[in-house]
Image (cartoon, rainbow, N blue to C red):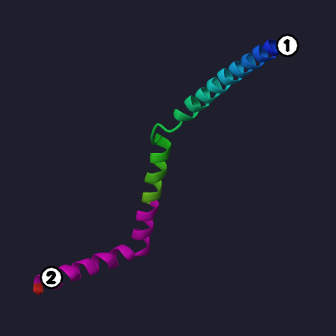
Amino acid sequence: MSHSTLLKATVGAKIRLTTWSDTTITRIRQRHANLDRGQTAFEYLGIILVVIVIIGAVVGSGVGSEITKRIKQAVTDIKAG
């Protein structure tokens, strides 16, 4: 094999490898760039359910009335002072 034939083969392989890697990287970036477009309805539903459970726990445990009583007392103390 002559020097020029080996050089041509090396350059050709380098060009094919570079083209393949550029194409592959571009496709990977495109595939993963489209995944995060924002919240889905299912995620919003999950957040709403968590909030409902927290509110239900506060109302069911009686803590809500205690909080209301203390807030009313604080407002009364501010008005009196």
Q: Amino acid at mark 1?
A: Ser
Q: CA distance from mark 1 to mark 2?
A: 97 Å
Give x and y (percent) for residue 44.
45, 47
User: Going 78% across and 16% down the picture, which residue do you hit?
Assistant: 9
Is 41 included in the stretch rendered in magenta? no
Pick whichever, 39 or 19, lies toward us.
Answer: 19
Residue at left 49%, top 50%?
A: 46
Going from N to C along the chain, the mark reached first, 1 or 2, is: 1
- Residue visible at 68% across and 19% down? 15
Which type of secondary structure does the marked residue at label 2 adopt? helix
For disc 1, the marked residue is 2
| Residue 64 locus on image (x, y percent) | 35, 73
Give the residue pinned by disc 2: 78
Image-based side of 76 in relation to 38, left or right: left
Identity of the residue furthest to the bottom in this view: 81
Q: Which of the two marks, 1 or 2, is nearer to us in this view?
A: 1
Query: For the stretch drawn in magenta, what is the main secondary structure?
Result: helix
Closer to the camera in the image, 2 or 81? 2
